[in-house]
Image (cartoon, rainbow, N blue to C red):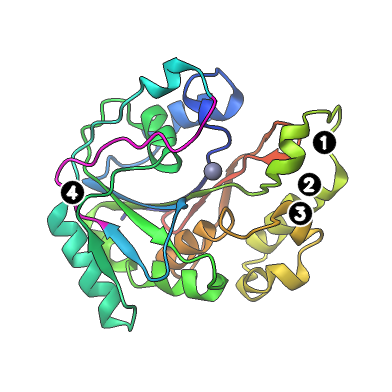
Amino acid sequence: MQPTLFISHGSPMLALEEEPTAKFLQNLSSKLPTPQAIIVASAHWETNEPQITGAAQPATIHDFKGFPKALYDLRYPSPGAPQLAARIESLLKAVGFNASIDYSRGLDHGVWNPLLLMYPDAAIPVVELSIQPHRDARWHYKLGQALSALRAENILIIGTGNLTHNLYQAMRGNHHTVPSWVTAFAEWVAKCMSDNDLESLFEWERLAPYAKENHPTAEHFLPLFVALGAANTPLNAQRLHSDITLGVLAMDAYKFGAQ
Ligand code: ZN
């Protein structure tokens, strides 16, 4: 049985800089059963209704501007998994989602950046799942839940975003110490996880300290709920990693489900 993961992917430079989160990701795959395929819900694919990549050979999308050429030269040539995409579509439709397959879309940096560190061979087929930023945490939990059975078929389900994501503050780059509004939010999430308190997590925009400061928009937090839903219960949440990058971006990673 595969666990599910939430991964904070940080800056696109993650794959090139030797920072603690990159090292963590490089070591992570050796601690997991090798999956047969990987499904990744990414903050960087926002759609009105759930979509799934269906390309047999998805391209690497360099969906960022102003970074060094070395980053644009990186490729993640993993195969896609058209049959798995079709199964995901039918699993989602079966519970009422108006899901569809996008046969031309490639993998964005929220997907390939962490996978390049975790599985550098790019040999494991990857399917990407979109998020719906106008929908709430419960919606994304249900999205994950619909895919939960695939874990028993050795399929790894990952949500990729950032535990905190105030990009405006990150770009200002003048943070000598980590602001308390960042740590307060990250520790509130950690407490909910250790208490198995899903109900509070669902209400994070209302209950979490400094929710709006940490997530002026919700898209980098919502993939967490796909991972939570796919784990189903018991959650068995484990905080695998925590770090802060660019002053205010919490880089927490969590594992759910399988022990
Ligand atoms: Zn991102």
Type of the residue with mark 4: Ala
Q: Residue 182 carries which label?
A: 2
Which label's residue is closer to the chain start, 1 or 4? 4
Range of magenta residues: 53-66
Residue 50 coordinates in the image, percent (x, y): 36, 67
1 and 4 marks in contact (CB < 8 Å): no
Q: What residue type is labelled 2?
A: Val
Q: Tag 3, which secondary structure?
A: helix
Instruction: Name the kind of residue labelled 1 in the image.
Output: Val
Q: How far apart are marks 2 and 3 (CA)?
A: 5 Å
Secondary structure beneath label 2: helix
Q: Is the C-beta separation of discs 1 and 2 under 8 Å?
A: yes
Disc number for residue 161: none
Q: Camera-side residue: 188 or 159?
A: 159
* Dots 2, 3 in contact, CB < 8 A: yes
- Closer to the camera: disc 4 or disc 2? 4
Judging by the rendered image, the residue that carries numbered circle 3 is 185
